Image (cartoon, grey):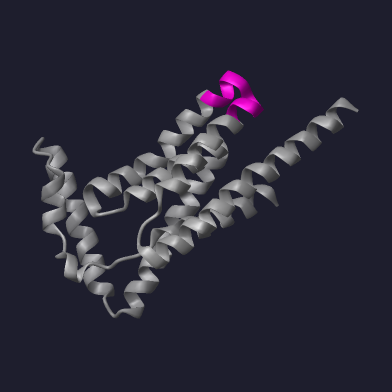
Amino acid sequence: MFGQMFSEIDKTAAIVQWGFVIGACLIAAIWDMRTRRIPNWLSIPLLAGGFVFAVWTGGLYGIAEAVGACFLLAFPFLLLFLFAGGGAGDVKLMAAIGAWLGFRQGVVVLFCVAAAGVVLALVKAIMGKRFKSVIKNIFISVYVFVVSVLFHKFRPAVVKETVMPDSDALIVPYGAAILAGVCIAGGIILL
């Protein structure tokens, strides 16, 4: 009886957890496609709610996992923000998703969001007849970043200056990729 009750609590917690994350990602995607930004009024309360949920469901262990997952999911997007012109809203939204989902689910989400982002960028590049220039830009950015780190002359501005000028940049509303990746991950984990 207790085992059955515990699994029902887990199911309810998962529904609440994924419901908040998917709902917030849907709002973020719509907002990002319309305004090209993900607002703090969405990400910050989502992050706080994730920490509250983590304490409620896991106590001290839960909050420790939420903080770790928060950093794990935000870190790649922080690098994109610093070196490749990604958005700060993407960083904050991914941090909030990490706080809600923890490590195991967060890693799945991270891979799914990255894959969705690559697909979205490639589709947009192909539709805009800019595939070659986008691939060239990616290789140049990676090369400059690696050389800068290897020779200890690391300057984020160098990477940004080396890529295409802003007028030629391929702009992708990453909120849509985050939503797609979260939905795919949710399907993988929950089904």
| x and y percentages locating residue 98 in the rendered image | 49, 39
Q: Residue furthest top?
A: 60
Give the quadrant of residue 149: top left
Q: Residue at x 13, y 39 (%)?
A: 154
Magenta-colored segment: predominant secondary structure: helix
Q: Residue at x 12, y 57 (%)?
A: 162
Give the quadrant of residue 94: top left
Q: Residue at x 91, y 28 (%)?
A: 1
Left or right position of 93 against 125: right
Question: Is residue 103 in sight in this rendering?
Answer: no
| x and y percentages locating residue 60 in the rendered image | 57, 19
Q: Residue at x 36, y 39 (%)?
A: 75
| x and y percentages locating residue 112 in the rendered image | 50, 53
Front-most of 188 and 170? Answer: 170
Question: Is residue 142 in sight in this rendering?
Answer: yes
Give the quadrant of residue 170: bottom left
| x and y percentages locating residue 40 in the rendered image | 40, 46
Q: Residue furthest front?
A: 41
On whether residue 77 falls in the magenta region, the answer is: no
Residue 44 in the image: above or below residue 143? above
Residue 128 in the image: above or below residue 90? below
Left or right position of 79 against 145: right
Q: Which span is picked out in magenta? A: 54-63
On whether residue 62 falls in the magenta region, the answer is: yes
